[in-house]
Amino acid sequence: MLGSNLPLRALVVFEASARLGSFRAAADELGLTPSAVSHQVRALEAALGVDLFERVGRGVTLSQDGGNLFTGIRDGFELLKRAVDATRRRRSGRMLQVVRLQTPPSFASRWLLPRLPALLAAHPGIDIRVNADKDQRPNTPGVDLAIVYGDARAWSTRATRLLDETIQPLCAPPLADGIHGPTDLLSRPLIGTRGNALTWRTWFRRQGIDFERTGAAAMELDPSDVAIEAAAKGLGIVLESSVLTEDEMREGQLVSPLPGFAISGPAYWLLPSAAGDGQAGADLVRTWLLERAAAEGSSTRYS
């Protein structure tokens, strides 16, 4: 027990759920069932007297209280993990270089994870740990390398540009029929996502359309992963990033009904490697990421 009535197990489950943004992903990481994870979270919420998550569709997002708790315990959990990992490696004699990489959640699942096998094949001596986190603080404790998202004013003087993006309306091919201009979207189901770099209101304003007066309905789905999947299944039109929808665009699950109305968005930036024991490994990963992004041509093209 932690204190008088807060079980450590529940805090472990909460930390994994908050970090991964999914009860199912936390269950997989911890070797539990999703229902067991949900039970532990509910028990912690009952003990604290607050709601830690907001249930959105099939996913979850942190409430304000949940975000505050996660911020308070995150660094402590990371230090515990590093100590355990170091002890385990000394015991087993492993010589792998551990590199802890932090990225925005949607970028981790949609761009980074599909490329991790190639990274590990190129550098078999690297033991990479990915922390998908919305937090973008430079020099976060326990992080060797960080990918952040934003505009040049925020990051150009302290980070290297990794990927540029464009943001545009995207939908399943059948929904694109009959769309010839921005006003045609007003009669279609629109999907919005909280926290995206560009909202439907802003996009329509740039086209000279008063979105507020139209009364056009929009559903809100979070995070971007959920919104993109819904759009690919034909539920509506999403305003999304070329970086995050690369696979769906390539496979024809999503198309741009108005290709001439794409807007340049913020970029993904790679912060310098942190100094420390893992710097050599972090430098290898950093170089590989920059070379891979350049080779794919993605830098010529938004969680």
Image: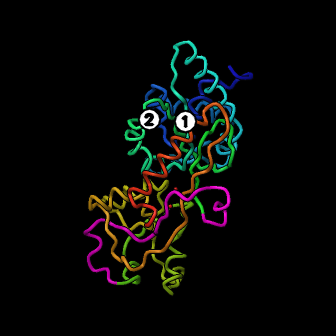
Q: Which mark is residue 281?
A: 1
Asked whether, in this view, residue 288 is left or right of residue 43, the answer is left
The answer to which quarter of the image holds residue 97 is top right
Give the spatial CA distance, label 1 vs label 2: 9 Å
- For the N terminus, give its image quadrant: top right
Q: Say which residue label 2 marks.
A: 123
Q: Are marks 1 and 2 in contact (CB under 8 Å)?
A: yes
Element type at marker 1? Answer: helix
Q: For the residue carrying disc 2, how many other residues have a C-alpha within 10 Å: few (<14), some (14-19), or many (20+)?
A: some
Q: Position of residue 258 (x, y in %)?
A: 36, 77
The answer to which quarter of the image holds residue 118 is top left
Asked whether, in this view, residue 288 is left or right of residue 66, the answer is left
Residue type for callout 2:
His
Asked whether, in this view, residue 213 is left or right of residue 298, the answer is right
The answer to which quarter of the image holds residue 144 is top right
Q: Residue at x 55, y 30 (%)?
A: 98
Q: Is residue 156 magenta?
A: yes
Q: Residue at x 62, y 30 (%)?
A: 11
Q: Is residue 272 magenta?
A: no
Q: Position of residue 51 (x, y in %)?
A: 62, 43
> Looking at the image, is 15 positioned above or below residue 209?
above
> Looking at the image, is 206 positioned above or below residue 217?
below
> Looking at the image, is 302 positioned above or below residue 187?
above
Question: Which comes before the other along the chain, label 1 or label 2?
Answer: 2
Residue farthest along the bottom direction in this orientation: 208
- Which colour style is shown? rainbow
Element type at marker 2? Answer: loop
Query: Magenta part of the protein: which range?
Result: 151-180
Q: For the residue carrying disc 1, how many other residues have a C-alpha within 10 Å: few (<14), some (14-19), or many (20+)?
A: many
Residue type for callout 1:
Gly
